[in-house]
Amino acid sequence: MFVRITPVLIAAALICAHFFRAGSYALAGLCLILPLVLLYRRRWSLIVLQCATYAASLVWLGAALELVQMRQQMGRPWTTAALILGAVALFSLLAGLLLNARSLRERYPF
């Protein structure tokens, strides 16, 4: 179970840092406290966290596209930034997929 929950905590911390850097302090705070729903041993908590990690991966992809466009307009290299943000988006997506494991569904009943 630890292996399946740790990536969600890391993904939440990463998206929190993104929102904090952008000045969206309310969203950053929400991202920090959202993993606490795991304390409720109900299936809805897993679904909420899955939706949050999938949304986080979309935010990362949007940030990557925006950064790539900005760097291309400035004539600066953009491939490294795109790879890093793409990897973070993929990590967030996989963190959500890990919550769909049978072992977690058994521990979090309806």
Image (tube, rainbow, N blue to C red):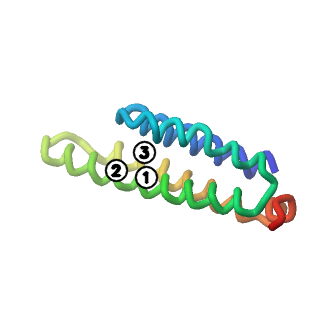
Asked if 17 appears above or below 37 in the picture, the reply is above
Chain-order first, disc 2 or disc 1: 2
What residue is at 74 percent from the left and 49 percent from the top?
A: 38
Give the mark, 3 or 2, whose residue is nearer the N terminus: 2
Q: What residue type is labelled 3?
A: Ile
Query: Do residues under tags 3 and 2 come within 8 Å of each other at their CB atoms?
Result: no
Residue 84: give its label: 3
Label 3 – label 2 distance at C-alpha: 9 Å
Query: Looking at the rendered structure, which numbered label has been put on residue 52?
Result: none
Q: Where is residue 14 in the image (x, y as percent from the top left)?
A: 52, 39
Q: Residue 86 carries which label?
A: 1
Residue 15 rendering spot, x and y as whole percentages: 49, 42
Residue found 13% across the figure and 41% down from its top: 74
The image quadrant of residue 33 is top right
Q: The residue tagged with tag 2: helix, strand or loop?
A: helix
Image-based side of 103 in relation to 100, left or right: right
Q: Against 14, is 83 above or below? A: below
Q: Do the residues labelled 3 and 1 touch (CB within 8 Å)?
A: yes
| 32 relative to 27 in the view: left or right | right
